[in-house]
Amino acid sequence: MSILSAEWTALLYLAAAVCFILALKGLSSPRTARRGNLIGAAGATLAVITVFLSAKLDNIPLILLAIAVGSAIAAPISRRVQMTQMPQLVALFNGVGGGAAALVAMLELGHSEGPWVLVAVVFTMLVGAVSFAGSAITVAKLQELITTRPVVFPGMKWVMTLAVVAALVIGGVVVATGSIGWALLLLVLGLAVGLLLVLPVGGADVPIVISLLNAFTGLAVAASGVVLDNVLLVVAGTLVGASGTILTRAMASAMGRGVSGIMFGAFRGGSTAGSTTQSDRPVRSSNPEDVAVMLAYAQRVVIVPGYGLAVAQGQHTIAELATTLEARGVDVAFAIHPVAGRMPGHMNVLLAEANVPYESLKEMAEVNPEFKNTDVVLVVGANDVVNPAAKTSPGAPIYGMPILEVEEGRQIVFLKRSMRPGFAGIENELLFDPKTTLLFGDAKDSLTKVLGAVNAL
C-alpha cells in the first residue's frame, strides 16, 4: 500500500522529467544558468518526494534513513568545497551515481525476468562499476593523491582487452543463468576495467575523462530505469548520457584532439602529463608598480584568467581591477578558453561570482582576432591555454589544441607563482619572449598590489 496512486506517480514523474529538460536548456547560457539549476533542483526534489509517497509504507523508514545518511555526507562536502575542487566534486558525484546504479541492478538480479531485462541488469552493473572506479581515479589524480602522469605498464593494453572480453563473456553467463556469484565477478571486472581505462590518462586530459564517465553514469542510470520499470530514471539517465557525450566531444574539440587519442594516447606517447620541473632560463620580471603603469595607460587590456586565479581566489580583486581600469577609460575584456580552469564554464562561474558582466567575457573565437589590437594582455594563472607550442611543436602533448593567441598582443604580462610548467607539463616559450613580463607571486596578492598601484597613479 502506498500514498500515491500509479496515475499520480506517473504524472509527477512526467513533471520532474520536464524540469530536467528545462534545467538543461537553462544551463546552456550563463544568463539563465542559475535559473536552470534551480529548476533542476526542483525536479530532483519532486522526484524524491514522489518516490517517497509512492513507496510501500513499510519501506519508508529505510528511505528516510538513506536520505539522512546521504544528506549528512553530501551537505558538509558541498558547502566546504572550493571552486578549484569542482572537477573533483563532479567526478565524485559521477562515481557515486554509477556505483549506486550498479548495486541496485545487482540487488534486482534475482527479481528480474526476461532476457532483455537481464541484459539491462548486466549493462548497468558493468558500466556503473566502470564509472565508479574510473571516477575514483580521476578524483585521486586531480587531488594529487596519486601522480597526474599517465600510469602504464608493459602489456597494459592487452590486459585491458582481456578484462573487457572477460567482462562481456561473464555478462553473457549472468544473462543466461542469473547467478549472483557470476554477477559479483562481473562487478569486480567492471571495477578493473574502470581502473585500467583511466590510469593511462594524465594531466590536462583528466577533465575530459570526467565528462565521458558522466555519460557512462547516465547510461547506467537509464538502464537501471529499465530494470526497475521506472520511466523517470530512463529519461534522466538518457539526458545525462546524451549531454555528457556532447560535452565530451566539445571538450575534445576544444583540446584539438580525438576522444580515442585522449583515452589511449599514453600507449603511443600522446597523453598529456603533469610535471613539476621548473625552468632556470632567464626571463624578464617586473614589479606591481610597473605593471600598474602598463595597464593604466593602455587603451585596450585583455585579461586571460586561468586555474591559478581560481586557486588564489582572486576573482573579486581582478573584477575590481577591471572596474578601476574602465573608470580610467581603458577598454577591458576577459578572454575565456573553453577548458580554462580545467572544466568548461569554470572561469565563467568564477567571474560571475565576482559580478563581472557577461558582456565582458569573450569566447576564444571572438577574442582571438582582437589580440593584435590589444595593448596589454594580462595572463593570470593560465599557461597551457595560451602556449604557442599547441601550434608550433608537433611533438608537444597539446599540439593541435586551439589556444588563445595572446602572443599577438603588443605587451604580455604573466602573473605566476613560479616557472613551473602548466598542467600539460611542457614549457611555454611565450614566457621568454622579449615583449613578455612576469610578475611572480600569489595571484590574489599580486593583483591587490597592482590595484593599489593603479589607484595611486
Image: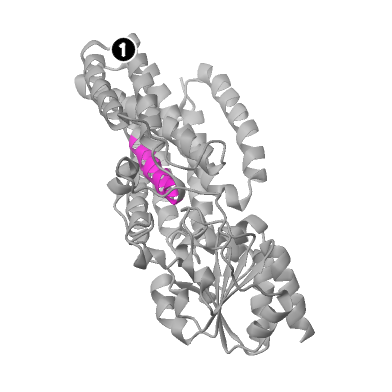
Colour treatment of the image:
one colour
Provide the secondary structure element on which disc 1 rests. helix
Whether residue 107 is visible to the viewer of this picture, yes or no, is yes
Which amino acid type is shown beneath numbered disc 1? Trp
Please give the name of the residue rendered at 57% of the width and 74% of the height, measured from the top-left corner. 357
In the displayed structure, 141 sits above or below 403; it is above
Of the pair 102 and 313, the residue shown nearer to us: 313
Give x and y (percent) for residue 427.
Answer: 48, 60
> Which residue is the extreme one toward the front?
281
Give x and y (percent) for residue 328.
Answer: 67, 88
Is the magenta region chiefly helix, strand or loop?
helix
Magenta region, residue range: 204-219
Total marks in image = 1
Q: Residues within 10 Å of mark 1 (few under 14, many from 20)?
A: some
The residue pinned by badge 1 equals 182
Give x and y (percent) for residue 214.
Answer: 40, 42
Residue 212, magenta (yes or no): yes
> Is 112 left or right of 374, judged from the image as shown?
left
Quadrant into which the C terminus falls: bottom right
Of the pair 421 and 159, the residue shown nearer to us: 421
Please give the name of the residue rendered at 37% of the width and 47% of the height, measured from the top-left corner. 271
Residue 115, picture quadrant: top left
Residue 178, magenta (yes or no): no
Please give the name of the residue rendered at 64% of the width and 72% of the height, measured from the top-left corner. 285
In the displayed structure, 115 sits above or below 274; it is above
In the displayed structure, 266 sits above or below 321; it is above
Whether residue 117 is visible to the viewer of this picture, yes or no, is no
